[in-house]
């Protein structure tokens, strides 16, 4: 990247208070910053005639308080509020929370000052450049200041991928989707056909997946009934490397002017967007600000104000600044508290070809050609074939892509690049060359698209010029047939207001076929939303198809009108008519969601010069299956409707296994979770769903196994929410949600409830018979010396609540209130969920 410096606007010479450095210069800049400014160690809080009242109780109180810095909560830590209004901080918890804000040297200095003390007072760490205070209104510990030379580099633009990944799936899981279709065509006169059966599923063990798809169906040619293998393959998943390996029937990915090919063999694909779908374009090369005084920093991108920061002295990383595709002019203006003002600028170029800057992707597939067409793959001729591509996006150079497809009969190479222009435009090129029995062929595509900004939004302009020679071919083509030599298309979309936009398209196709002349068309259509529910479309088109021998009857000029009513996201009605084709349609539909008991339906009617039709569809989602029923009547005119009719019924279900549990549920698209009740729930059912409001759910457990969440997506954090139907009062079911991050075609098993399901409530009284307010302590099982302690605390009136207790077990609570104190209680073996301890007294703690 290039860096250019502008003249400072302050009226006098000053020492540079800001620098933009690369990571390799970071240590030098830190040293310079420390040498340029002498920072006096902060002292403790100013002593006053009386200390501020932070503890209203006449005793020491231990609380858990948040630690805040610049209105940002770093975490929570135990704090002791003394009766004389001092606050004492727990050492280990504090050092862990503040560590990310300090340089390595500052962390070591703080560790040396605190030493082996379990707790410390704020004044003790002043020499480390850290000043603390306690806010009794927020009940929080505040970091008032960190000396600039002690601060670590702070990232100003934090990436969106900071969320911790959810729980990983089980090592082994499997599922099988079963779909059955019954059909009847009145034209056949045979009544119901034998059902078609579709089976697909996957078995996953660690990162290895076996996936397959089979179907039994009637052959359209000889009316025979057989079993077809659509595909069967192994997939080895490597999410950490954004890569997959394949073995078996392949489904190759292609780019540019490559053609799709059916083949079998081995393959590998790397594509980071598949594994991380929510990354935004960011500045990849590091840039840092070093501020030697408190400053206001303003960032502009491409002439538009982007964000303003009020920053203390220290180091700041702007490497995650979001960028627009294209040339980015970054301007940074810094105004110090002393009045000095400086401006810096640099340029960043972002060119993606669907990739982030600096990223690359590739695919390579080697095997034999499939000549079976639809249905069973046929590799009997053993024709070797290869297809692959590689693409790379750079930061300050145009992105590139290359590809190759090779077989005995066809050799094809492709290339791609694109240039991002300063005016928010892009110029792209796709090139291809082939050699086959028919000869050498060439293909080229050039595209230009531009975004035009306006007060009401963005307009878009696109031009595409495409040339294909007569002999250009790819390995996926059965025979070479390129009737169109040149294809020129231009589109402009204009947004006049937020509710009105229009699109104009023009195209011209140059024919080399003896059956077709050149063709061209011009069309324009406007969309206007005149209320939240209603919108209208209107436009015209002029068309010349170029077909001979009577096929040109749709040539000419015509009008298009449409009316759309959409009162909510899943309900839509529309009327449309095209005068050039004399084609009209009416449709009303309400789509289903994935919740059990959901209904959906649609009704459609169409009319044209040659045919009329009326049809409908009914969809239903049950707890363990989903189904849809369709019926369509067809005729050459309205009087003939019903002479021909097509009726189908589809029913789909699935079998899924994970964690030793088997369940019947609805069709699984990718990954799934089974949710099962713990035996202590004694047969009560659990439900799962995205939202459990009003008793609606996705699935419910029962005779056919656990409840099933059937629509989980790979590589994304998602939440599986669950609840128990008529749970016992006080029964602890846990969080009611589990955060998961599925792998490719993976499974989970979630058990709701546990052996420790009892919740206890009560009021703690002291020796004086009064409630003991705002104390904290720990809870332990009495029968397990090494049991993990659980936190215990009371509220302002001495009330407490304890969860996850096991029936038949004795527990001890220890706390400090005018000395070590404790009490014990036993959960009755027959308790069903809630234990009311009433008023609990104390007993002196017996020290060993």
Image: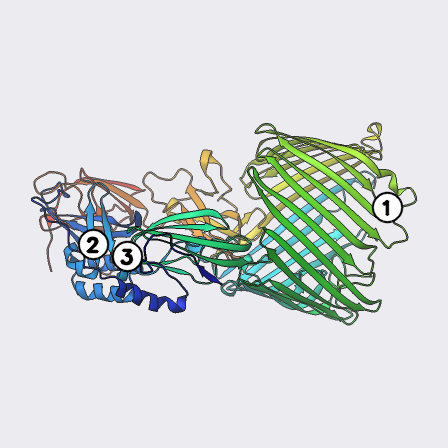
Question: Which percent across, then down, holds residue 371?
Answer: 77, 63
Residue 684 appears anywhere in the view:
no
Q: Quadrant of residue 188?
A: top right
Crowd rating for badge 3 (residues with CA inside 10 Å; few <14, some 14–19, many 20+): some
Mark 2 vs 1: CB contact within 8 A: no
Q: How many marks?
A: 3
Secondary structure, mark 3, is helix
Q: Secondary structure at mark 2?
A: strand
Q: Position of residue 208 (x, y in %)?
A: 55, 65
Q: Position of residue 808 (x, y in %)?
A: 26, 49
Q: Position of residue 335 (x, y in %)?
A: 34, 51
Label 3 to label 2, Cα distance in Å? 15 Å
Residue furthest out toward the right:
549
Q: Looking at the image, is 86 positioned above or below residue 438?
A: above
Residue indicated by mark 3 = 97
Disc 1 and disc 3: Cα gap in Å?
Answer: 73 Å
Q: Is residue 672 left or right of residue 536?
A: left
Q: Is residue 42 left or right of residue 350?
A: left
Marker disc for residue 131: 2
Residue at (16% x, 57% y) in the render: 120
Mark toward the start of the polypeptide (2 vs 1) = 2
Residue pointed to by mark 1? 546
């Amino acid at each position: 990247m290039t860096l250019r410096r502008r003249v400072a606007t302050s009226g006098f010479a000053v020492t540079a208070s800001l620098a933009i450095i690369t990571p390799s210069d970071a240590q030098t800049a830190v040293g310079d910053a420390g040498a340029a400014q002498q920072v006096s160690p902060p002292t403790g809080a100013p002593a006053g005639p009386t200390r501020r009242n932070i503890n209203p109780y006449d005793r020491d109180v231990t609380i858990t308080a948040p630690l805040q810095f610049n209105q940002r909560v770093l975490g929570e830590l135990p704090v002791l509020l003394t009766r004389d209004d001092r606050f004492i901080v727990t050492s280990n918890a504090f050092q862990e929370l503040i560590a990310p804000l300090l340089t390595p040297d500052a962390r070591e200095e703080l560790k040396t000052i605190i030493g082996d003390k379990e707790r410390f007072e704020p004044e003790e760490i002043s020499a480390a450049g850290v000043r603390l205070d306690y806010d009794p209104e927020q009940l929080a510990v505040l970091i008032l200041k960190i000396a600039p030379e002690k601060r670590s580099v702070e990232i100003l633009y934090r990436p969106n991928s900071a969320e911790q990944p959810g729980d990983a799936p089980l090592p082994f899981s499997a599922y099988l989707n079963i779909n059955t279709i019954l059909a009847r065509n009145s034209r056949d006169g045979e009544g119901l056909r034998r059902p078609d059966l579709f089976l697909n599923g996957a078995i996953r063990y660690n990162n290895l997946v076996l996936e397959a798809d089979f179907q039994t169906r009637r052959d359209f040619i000889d009316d025979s009934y057989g079993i077809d293998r659509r595909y069967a393959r192994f997939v080895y998943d490597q999410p950490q490397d954004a890569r997959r390996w394949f073995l078996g029937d392949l489904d190759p990915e292609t780019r540019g002017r490559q053609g799709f090919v059916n083949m079998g063999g081995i393959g590998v694909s790397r594509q980071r967007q598949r594994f991380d779908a929510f990354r935004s374009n960011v500045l990849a090369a590091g840039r840092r600000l070093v501020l030697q005084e408190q400053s206001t920093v303003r960032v502009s991108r491409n002439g538009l104000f982007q964000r303003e920061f009020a920053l203390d002295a220290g180091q700041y990383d702007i490497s995650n600044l979001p960028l627009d595709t294209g040339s980015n002019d970054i301007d940074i203006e810094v105004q110090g508290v002393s009045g000095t003002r400086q401006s810096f600028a640099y340029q960043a170029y972002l060119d993606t070809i669907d990739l982030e800057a600096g990223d690359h992707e590739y695919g390579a597939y080697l095997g034999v050609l499939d000549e079976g067409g639809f249905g069973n793959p046929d590799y009997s001729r053993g024709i070797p074939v290869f297809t692959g591509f590689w693409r790379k996006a750079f930061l300050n150079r145009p992105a590139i892509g290359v590809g190759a497809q090779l077989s005995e009969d066809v050799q094809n190479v492709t290339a791609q690049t694109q240039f991002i222009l300063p005016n928010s435009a892009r110029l792209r090129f796709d090139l291809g060359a082939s050699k086959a029995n028919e000869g050498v062929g060439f293909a080229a595509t050039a595209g230009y698209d531009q975004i035009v900004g306006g007060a009401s939004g963005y307009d878009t302009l696109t031009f595409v010029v495409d040339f294909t020679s007569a002999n250009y071919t790819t390995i996926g083509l059965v025979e070479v047939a390129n009737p169109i030599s040149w294809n020129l298309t231009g589109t402009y979309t204009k947004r006049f207001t937020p509710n009105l936009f229009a699109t104009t398209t023009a195209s011209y196709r140059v024919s080399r076929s003896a059956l077709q002349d050149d063709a061209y068309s011009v069309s324009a259509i406007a969309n206007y939303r005149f209320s939240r529910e209603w919108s209208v479309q209107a436009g015209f088109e002029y068309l010349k198809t170029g077909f001979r021998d009577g096929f040109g009857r749709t040539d000419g000029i015509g009008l298009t009108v449409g009316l759309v009513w959409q009162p909510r996201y899943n309900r839509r009605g529309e009327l449309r008519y095209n005068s050039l084709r004399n084609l009209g349609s009416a449709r009303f539909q309400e789509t289903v969601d994935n919740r059990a008991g959901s209904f959906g339906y649609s009704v459609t009617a169409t009319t044209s010069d040659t045919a009329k039709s009326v049809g409908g569809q009914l969809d239903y989602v049950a707890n363990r299956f989903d189904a849809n029923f369709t019926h369509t009547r067809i005729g050459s005119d309205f009087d003939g409707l019903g002479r021909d009719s097509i009726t189908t019924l589809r029913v789909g279900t699935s079998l899924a296994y994970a964690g030793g549990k088997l369940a019947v549920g609805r069709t699984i698209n990718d990954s799934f979770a089974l949710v099962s009740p713990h035996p202590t729930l004694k047969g009560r059912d659990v439900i799962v769903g995205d939202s459990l409001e009003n008793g609606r759910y996705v699935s419910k457990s029962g005779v056919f196994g656990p409840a099933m969440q059937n629509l989980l997506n790979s590589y994304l954090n998602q939440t599986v929410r669950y609840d128990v139907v008529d749970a016992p009062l006080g029964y602890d079911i846990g969080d009611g949600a589990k955060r998961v991050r599925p792998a490719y075609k993976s499974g989970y098993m979630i058990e709701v409830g546990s052996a420790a399901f009892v919740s206890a409530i009560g009021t703690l009284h002291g020796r004086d018979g009064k409630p003991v307010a705002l104390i904290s302590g720990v809870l332990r099982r009495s029968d397990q010396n090494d049991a993990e302690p659980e936190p215990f605390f009371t509220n302002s009136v001495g009330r407490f609540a304890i969860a996850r207790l096991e029936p038949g077990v004795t527990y001890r609570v220890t706390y400090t209130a005018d000395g070590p104190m404790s009490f014990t209680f036993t959960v009755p073996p027959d308790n069903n969920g809630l234990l009311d301890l009433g008023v609990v007294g104390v007993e002196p703690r017996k020290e060993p």
